[in-house]
Amino acid sequence: MAGINNIIEVSGLVKKFGSLAAVDGVTFDVPEGEFFGFLGPNGAGKTTLIRMLTTLLKPTGGRAVVAGIDVSASPQEVRKKIGVVPQALTSDLDLTGYENMDLYGRFYSIPSRERREKIKNLFEIIGLSNRQNDLVATYSGGMRRRLEIARVLVHAPTVLFLDEPTIGLDPQSRRAVWEFLEKFRKEYSLTIFLSTHYMEEAESLCDRLAIIDNGKIIVLDSPDRLKSELPGNDIIHLTLSDLSMISPVEDKIKGLAFVHNVVAEGEDLRVFVENGAVNFTPLLESVKEAGGIVNSVGIHQLSMEDVFIHHTGKSIREEGGKKVNFFVGAGLPQKLSR
Ligand SMILES: Nc1ncnc2c1ncn2[C@@H]1O[C@H](COP(=O)(O)OP(=O)(O)OP(=O)(O)O)[C@@H](O)[C@H]1O
Ligand SMILES: [Mg+2]
């Protein structure tokens, strides 16, 4: 099953916390050099999966091989091959950006000259050369995140794991992270494994992505193919003025020839249609006939969000309020045995 060039091979991986299967029998491979993503809502099992792949958590069952090494059998060996950026921010606020990177390099016993050169190059890529001697306490959230991503590349890993790397960042900082992840990938021939609950992020970065919900992979493919497999090509999004209208309206419009699927959430209806521009008016007439009063209406082309909704019947809410804990962790990886 596993090809020679797969840098990550996962089969039947399970993690249980008591009776809860946080990761529930997950199987996939990632070829070398791929930008691979896990997209899923809060509690889907993304962090648990990453923690198993990066040797921080022992699987309850199944198998995971990273860079040719079994994560359960030889965790120390795996750690030398990977860079891990956890969900929480972990750099030391009382040190400068340079010192944070340097400490990390020393930890991995990178010789001083090589360390200096590598760190210089990394600061250039993340565009923070002029801030490298400032305390991290003076960095913005986006700058700190950039530093933390670059930091784990000091020891030249072959696989980079990122758990929701742009959570809590403003759109501009998020884009900056996307850009230099691409640069890192090219410059260091990295394989990148990323988890996210941002649709746009998954779509713009990932060669392939797995949609995960309740610990299970629901679909896995390239963003383009995931979208092209959906019925129809446009979404008409309706908000009705009253919850009681949803059911009769849904029944009525499901019968229309150009309607492929209807997903209701509260007062909202998401209608998967053929040729939205042409069928917009007939749809609204049909809604009216069924007694529906429309509060707002919009039309858009299929997005990753619609892919998720199509497969799970619910939307991933991009919660603005989700916070990253700024004070978790000491900023250093687990000790390597020498
Ligand atoms: N140490 C633990 N003990 C008990 N339950 C846990 C533990 N860690 C995670 N869980 C549970 O496992 C499930 C998956 O959690 P996980 O953190 O992997 O999700 P996630 O996809 O990373 O979510 P988020 O987007 O919020 O970070 C959740 O139901 C969570 O409550
Ligand atoms: Mg998580």
Image (cartoon, grey):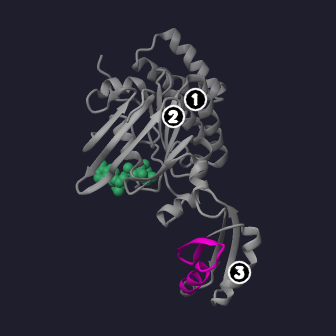
Q: Is residue 265 magenta?
A: yes
**x, y (%) of residue 283?**
69, 78
Tell me if mark 1 has few (under 14), some (14-19) or many (20+) residues whose alpha carbon lies within 10 angstroms of its own.
Answer: some
Residue 17 visible somewhere in the drawing:
yes
Amino acid type for the residue under numbered disc 2: Ile
Disc 3, SS: helix
The C terminus, quarter of image? top left
274 to the left or right of 336: right
Q: Front-most of 70 and 165?
A: 70
Q: Are marks 1 and 2 in contact (CB under 8 Å)?
A: yes
Label 3 to label 2, Cα distance in Å? 44 Å
Residue type pointed to by label 3: Leu
Numbered label attached to residue 257? none
Give the percent coordinates (x, y) of residue 39.
Answer: 49, 50
To which residue does mark 3 refer?
A: 284
For disc 3, the neighbor class at 10 Å (few under 14, some 14 to 19, many from 20) is some
The residue identified by callout 2 is: 192
Q: Nearer the viewer, mark 3 or mark 1?
A: 3
Q: Name the one closer to the observer, 156 or 252.
A: 252
Q: Is residue 126 magenta?
A: no
Q: Earlier in the sequence, mark 1 or mark 2?
A: 1
Answer whether residue 316 is visible to the viewer in this image.
no
First to last magenta residue range: 246-271
The Cα atoms of the two marked residues, 3 and 1, are separated by: 47 Å
Task: Look at the numbered disc 2 and give the secondary structure of its residue.
Answer: strand
Q: Where 217 falls versus 332 (above or below)? A: below
